[in-house]
Image (cartoon, grey):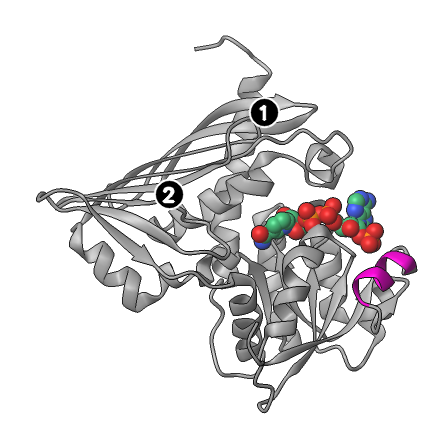
């Protein structure tokens, strides 16, 4: 690890919950970030907080929000608790970086956008993948231009989830593959193509939550897209784009750290293109700090969060309706 340059302005961070993702990724990344430092980490258990943040442990989320040295909070709570704690953090005057999914309903994202604007605070959904070097405009835009006008897109993500007791398997806490990994697919496809005019989804449920979905989408531009995600599959992710002049296949569209690559084929044979790796969590923390400090605009605007959530609501409704009628054509 290199020396961190901390000569510029730095914002004070609070964390709500001794979450696995905070331990594995957010806290180590914050230590490396040039414009932020940890002030407080709150847990329902003071011991758990102390194990992660010996210097800043507190025994409740409320204590984090009450700390005047906390400028911004990171929310890595179970999905079903995000809406409540984003609102509470805003009411306490904090900026908020909330893990994906920001909330579970588009209307909640819209309400939060209104609250944030009224409070003069930044709220951003933690789609760290958007900060990967492969999506830097200077890299991504010329690459996509090579394949010409977009005609079709396919995105997928899967892994095997089997931890009864995990919030991902609990409907009351926002469980389901759609909120855990489907959100990435829907965010990416709507980011590339905008809001769809048609959505057709089918899938299955397990333990009362959505487990696998296959979705077809049509966009006003004429682009036809599909998405597939599952809690019952290999560790896998892919983005395939078909343009009028060629194809582009992203190896790891949701990568959070290492290098990635893409196959570009514009008619003269597929060519492998490599992208450098970086820690997307550190990049996300630094970017968010820059937004708070007025030096950048959010990489994930709240309008984008509401847009993919509108699609997710339709998908979840259709999957539930069809799963209740197995075998229907
Ligand atoms: N961006 C990414 O790459 C990425 C990766 C993984 C997860 N995530 C997101 O991060 C969030 C947390 O995921 P995780 O895997 O870190 O989850 P996790 O390890 O289960 O942590 C969730 C934390 O929430 C707190 N919590 C409060 N009420 C709870 C309840 N009723 N049941 C369970 N936990 C409760 C717990 O903290 P205390 O007990 O300490 O209060 C717990 O440690 C999710 O929104 C997920 O989508 C993002």
| Whether residue 96 is situated above or below residue 34 in the rendered picture | above
Residue 78 visible (yes or no): no
**Residue at coordinates 40% horizontally, 49% vertically from top-left?**
253
Do the residues bearing badges 1 and 2 touch, measured as CB atoms within 8 Å?
Answer: no
Q: Residue furthest front?
A: 1
**Residue at coordinates 52% horizontally, 56% vertically from top-left?**
127
| Whether residue 163 is situated above or below residue 188 in the rendered picture | above
**Residue at coordinates 80% horizontally, 70% vertically from top-left?**
65
**Residues in magenta?**
47-53
Closer to the chain start, of discs 1 and 2, is 2
Q: How many marks?
A: 2
Give the percent coordinates (x, y) of residue 14: 74, 70
Q: Picture quarter containing residue 24? A: bottom right
Most common SS among magenta residues: helix
Q: Picture quarter containing residue 154? A: top left
Q: Nearer the viewer, residue 309 or 152?
A: 152
Residue 246 visible (yes or no): yes
Give the percent coordinates (x, y) of residue 159: 55, 34
**On the image, numbered disc 2 is attached to which residue?**
196
Q: Picture quarter containing residue 329? A: top left
User: Left or right of 42: which side holds 151?
Assistant: left
Task: Report helix, strand or loop for mark 2.
Answer: loop
Q: Is mark 2 within 8 Å of ligand 1?
A: no
* Pointer 2 local density, CA inside 10 Å: few below 14, some 14–19, many at least 20: many
**Residue at coordinates 75% horizontally, 59% vertically from top-left?**
85
How far is the residue under mark 1 from the one under mark 2?
Answer: 20 Å
171 within the magenta span: no
**On the image, numbered disc 1 is attached to which residue?**
320
Give the percent coordinates (x, y) of residue 35: 59, 81
Task: Report helix, strand or loop for mark 1.
Answer: helix
The image quadrant where one finds the N terminus is bottom right
């Amino acid at each position: 690890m290199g020396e961190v340059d901390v000569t510029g302005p730095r914002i004070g961070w609070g964390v709500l919950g001794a979450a696995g993702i905070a331990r594995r990724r957010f806290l180590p990344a914050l230590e490396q970030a040039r414009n932020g430092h940890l002030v407080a980490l709150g847990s329902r258990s003071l011991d758990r907080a102390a194990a992660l943040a010996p210097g800043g442990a507190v025994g409740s989320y409320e204590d984090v929000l009450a700390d005047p040295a906390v400028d911004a909070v990171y929310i890595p709570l179970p999905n079903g608790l995000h809406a409540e704690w984003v609102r509470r953090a805003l009411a306490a005057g904090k900026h908020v970086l909330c893990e994906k999914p920001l909330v579970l309903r588009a209307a909640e994202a819209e309400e939060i956008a209104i609250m944030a604007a009224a409070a003069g605070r930044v709220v951003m959904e933690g789609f760290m993948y958007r900060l990967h070097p492969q999506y830097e405009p200077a890299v991504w835009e010329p690459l996509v231009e090579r394949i010409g006008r977009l005609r079709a897109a396919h995105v997928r993500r899967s892994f095997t989830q089997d931890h009864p007791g995990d919030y991902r398997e609990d409907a009351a806490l926002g469980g389901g593959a759609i909120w855990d990994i489907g959100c990435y697919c829907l965010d990416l496809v709507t980011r590339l193509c905008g809001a769809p005019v048609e959505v057709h989804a089918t899938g299955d449920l397990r333990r009362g939550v959505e487990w696998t979905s296959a979705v077809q989408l049509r966009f006003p531009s004429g682009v036809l897209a599909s998405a597939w995600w599952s809690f019952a599959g290999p560790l896998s992710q892919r983005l395939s784009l078909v343009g009028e002049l060629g194809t582009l296949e992203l190896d790891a569209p949701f990568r959070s750290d290492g290098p990635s690559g893409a196959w570009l084929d514009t008619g003269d044979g597929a060519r492998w293109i490599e992208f450098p790796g970086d820690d997307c969590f550190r990049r996300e923390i630094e970017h968010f700090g820059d937004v708070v400090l007025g030096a950048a605009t959010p990489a994930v605007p709240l309008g984008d969060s509401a847009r993919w959530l509108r699609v997710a609501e339709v998908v979840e409704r259709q999957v539930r309706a069809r799963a209740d009628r197995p075998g229907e054509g």
